[in-house]
Image (cartoon, rainbow, N blue to C red):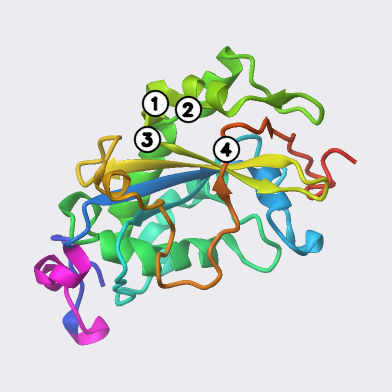
Amino acid sequence: MATAGGGWEEEQHGCRGSRLQADESFCSWECLVFTLQWPGGFCQSLNNESLCRIPEDVKGWTIHGLWPQTRTSCRCWPLFPSDIQELQDELEDQWPSLLKTRTSFTFWKEEWEKHGSTAACVEGLNSPLRYFQVCLKLRAQMDIQRLLEAASITPSCDQPYQVEDVKKALVPVVGHLAEVQCVKDEQGRQVWFQVKVPLSRSLITGCTSHAEEGRRFSETPGLDSSASPGHPCPPDTPLYFVPIDHQRPYRPCG
């Protein structure tokens, strides 16, 4: 049960928010990564085309997660529907599950227990409600769809785009260190999949600790063998920004 200070009952869950704050193994990270995914590209990342679903009301970029960049994970603070009940409608719109085998709440639960609970040593993220509120606020601030449209970068089955042009269009809201990720489709084309935005603990774009050490920003470094198949889009290869097709999510281009 969450307390007013953002902790939780030690008797029920075995640890407190203050313990997270004091535990260096959970709190030594410097950067977080906020990741947005393009549903049309996400479906191309799946080996089984029957798994993908795009809810009818999803028309644009959705949240994938907010991940502290650390090789440790708390996984010690469960999520319950009542924790985020007041945000459910907004989360369904901005952070839906795109897998038929996973409900949206299951998706949120996985992200909180794997990443949010580890981020909880930062005061502004120290409860499920605050973590998801921050993610929604970041999504609203990072209106990359508006920037892309202003740069005439719109979904298309036939029009390729240069990676440098895409990055340039996004700089005003994601900064210079954001990673544009692709996956390969069945035709071997580079298909735009995600944008990973490095943030400091104070949620300012441009955290450089990973960049300076030459590491890639990742979801669960060293923890999850089912990591995303996404990779940085090759700078010398055009990328495709495929449309969203709610009826044929895996094959938007036929």
Tell me the residue at 41%/73% (across/down).
Answer: 223
Where is residue 138 shown, x and y percent of the image?
37, 38
Image mark for residue 143: 2
Q: Dot 1 lies on which element?
A: helix
Q: Compare marks 4 and 2 and give the one earlier in the sequence.
A: 4
Q: Please provide the residue range marked out in magenta.
A: 11-27
Q: Dot 2 lies on which element?
A: loop
Identified by mark 4, the residue type is: Trp
Question: As drawn, is 23 to the left or to the right of 197?
Answer: left
Please identify, in this view, whether the residue under mark 2 or under mark 3 is nearer the observer: 3
Q: Nearer the viewer, residue 108 or 252?
A: 252
Question: As drawn, is 222 to the left or to the right of 189?
Answer: left
Q: Answer yes or no: do the residues labelled 1 and 3 have beta carbons within 8 Å?
A: no
Q: Compare marks 1 and 4 and give the one earlier in the sequence.
A: 4
Image mark for residue 61: 4
Tell me the residue at 73%/54% (across/down).
Answer: 53
Residue bearing mark 3: 177
Residue bearing mark 1: 173
Q: Compare marks 2 and 3 and give the one earlier in the sequence.
A: 2
Where is residue 136 shown, x and y percent of the image?
41, 42
Q: Residues within 10 Å of mark 4 (few under 14, many from 20)?
A: many
| Cα–Cα span, label 2 and label 3 | 17 Å
Q: Answer yes or no: do the residues labelled 4 and 2 have beta carbons within 8 Å?
A: no
Identified by mark 2, the residue type is: Asp
Identified by mark 3, the residue type is: Leu
> What is the chief secondary structure element of the magenta stretch?
helix
Q: Answer yes or no: do the residues labelled 2 and 3 have beta carbons within 8 Å?
A: no
| Cα–Cα span, label 1 and label 3 | 11 Å
Residue 24 lies in the magenta-colored region = yes
Please identify, in this view, whether the residue under mark 2 or under mark 1 is nearer the observer: 1
| Cα–Cα span, label 4 and label 2 | 9 Å
